[in-house]
Image (cartoon, helix red, strand yellow):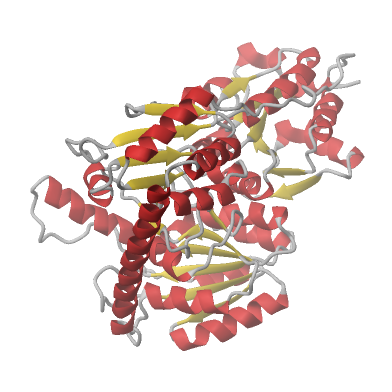
Amino acid sequence: MRGRQIFMDALRAHGVDKIFGNPGTTENPLLDSLIDYPDIDYVTSLHEGVAVSAASFYTQSANKPAVVNLHVAPGLGNGLGAIYGALKARSPVVITAGQQDTRMRMRSPLLSHDLVAMAAPVTKWSVEPASADEIGPIMQRAFKIAQEHPAGPVFVALPINVMEQESSVAATTMGHAFDAVTPDAGGIEQLQELLTAAQSPVIIAGDEVARTGAFHTLVLLAEQLGAPVYNEPLRAQVAFPNNHPSYAGRLGLEASSIKRALAGHDLVLMIGGVQLEEVWYDDCEPFPDNAKRVQIECTRAELAVDHRIDLGLYGDLAETLALTVNAIQTLPGDYAKNARARSQQIAQRREKTQAAAQASLDKTWDASPMAPARALHELANALPNNSIVVDESITASVELARVFNFKQPGDYIGGRGGGIGQGIAGAIGVQVAQPDRAVIALTGDGSAMYSIAALWSASHHNLPILFVVLSNREYRVLKHNMDIYRARFDTNSNKPYPNMDLTNPTLGFVDIAKGFGLEAQQITDADDIGERVSALLAAKRPALLDIVVSGKDFGMEN
């Protein structure tokens, strides 16, 4: 059999039924083989970055690995930013790219380059088979490495002649492996002692809580501890229900703001892939002084990577948290009483925060152009139950977590790594993974333009995604960051914001979307949002709403 058949058999053996890709000449062996594998669908993109983000978000929503097909050196280059996002999101994506015939390697053929070296910095493993005999073993190892904790992308270059070589080495899988590790009993005992001594514990929950089935146990743990729960500033998953009384919101992106948020707590419990990511340098650690630091992860390798800890536990997260809950239940009755008192205080603080946010919304309720918070409020009220929100709202993300109701993993999917353009591309993968649920992709106008070709994929494959662009006609987050930069480095703060306005010309998203075959409308009146959202979702066709909102400086000309 030929190498390309071995490759396709490997995909089938690993349960792959979708390939996200942008085809090219060196990918002809794969594309031609699809005719003989009707159970594997090809989700076509017009840009490699769209294909990678779609696949990455697919893995987050389907909880299974995905395969991407890119085109040789320039195509791989186009996808590198999205591959970085997949790496940060811990998405188990097997990324392939066609490679030129190896017999021409010394002639520097058109489009050729060292693909393995290009992909290596942003993948867990990067490899190129030297012969068709290696394709089966390489694909087996690729899927294994991609799914091992912490999961992430791998890259396989596929030379066109190797794909056409004959081989008797068939595709295989590693077989069924049980990889759940039971946490050390002594570690659970030490954790119990630390919790007994703590007067004010706090939890930081990461994406792995959602991915490993530990979500509901974490809710029980937070309630039994009487601890507030924060999530990371950039997240791919719902690790804790955002309407729960113990939900405290997201942490900041600098050590000083994280430390302020955690102030007063004497034990910080970090669970499930927590990365205290920073944008700005602060000459301090993000933890309160003298607070104990406990970290619970899936593997030992993830413990104490960036910060020292007082106790580290690794093992199956759901089992580890269940054993912790059982240990808390054995504590004296006074502990439960104190935990209930802490929970009441947390709930009261949350109510005050929510009331303040509502008061702020009320002040701008009738503003023109509408405030982003008002737009999100109307959207949240209009969405049907069981909707999925794919989020790249960036500066509106705090308000998003306040007004939407994300009750369980899968209700929300976001991008990691900080690179923009993942949102509307990722929505393609989410809708493919969840065809029976309404998918709403929230993005800003600047972010949307990075992967606007994703609209064609939605139309081409008839994916009933509602794309919502919050158009403030500026890179609002960059203006906020310019303010921070100027304050931190003591520069002139009265200067304008250079090259951060998206005007002259104003982006015409309605015309762009219609050109891709979508139903598209612009909204300037917040009272119109609910009716139009309901109508577009009922049509079950890909559609776009361009909602004009205010910019950073309220009252700016639009």
- Dividing the picture into quarters, in which one does residue 460 lie? bottom right
Q: Position of residue 423 (x, y in %)?
A: 52, 55
Report the label total: 0
Q: Position of residue 325 (x, y in %)?
A: 52, 43
Q: Position of residue 445 (x, y in %)?
A: 44, 64
Q: In this rendering, does residue 440 appear at all? A: yes
Residue sitting at 49 percent across and 74 percent down?
Answer: 546
**Left/right of residue 370 with respect to residue 282 in the rendered view:** right
- In the current view of this chain or complex, which residue is farthest to the front? 333
Which of the pair 254/481 is nearer the observer?
A: 254
Which of the pair 355/60 is nearer the observer?
A: 355
Q: Position of residue 505 (x, y in %)?
A: 38, 69
Task: Examine the rendered structure and indicate whether residue 294 appears above or below residue 477.
Answer: above
Q: In this rendering, does residue 52 appear at all? A: no
- Dividing the picture into quarters, in which one does residue 27 lie? top right
Residue sitting at 67 percent across and 44 percent down?
Answer: 63
From the image, which quarter does the C terminus lie in? bottom left
**Left/right of residue 169 with respect to residue 120 in the rendered view:** right
Task: Examine the rendered structure and indicate whether residue 455 appears above or below residue 106.
Answer: below
Task: Examine the rendered structure and indicate whether residue 456 appears above or below residue 207.
Answer: below
Which of the pair 299/236 is nearer the observer?
A: 299
Which of the pair 349/94 is nearer the observer?
A: 349
Residue sitting at 50 percent across and 68 percent down?
Answer: 404
From the image, which quarter does the N terminus lie in? top right
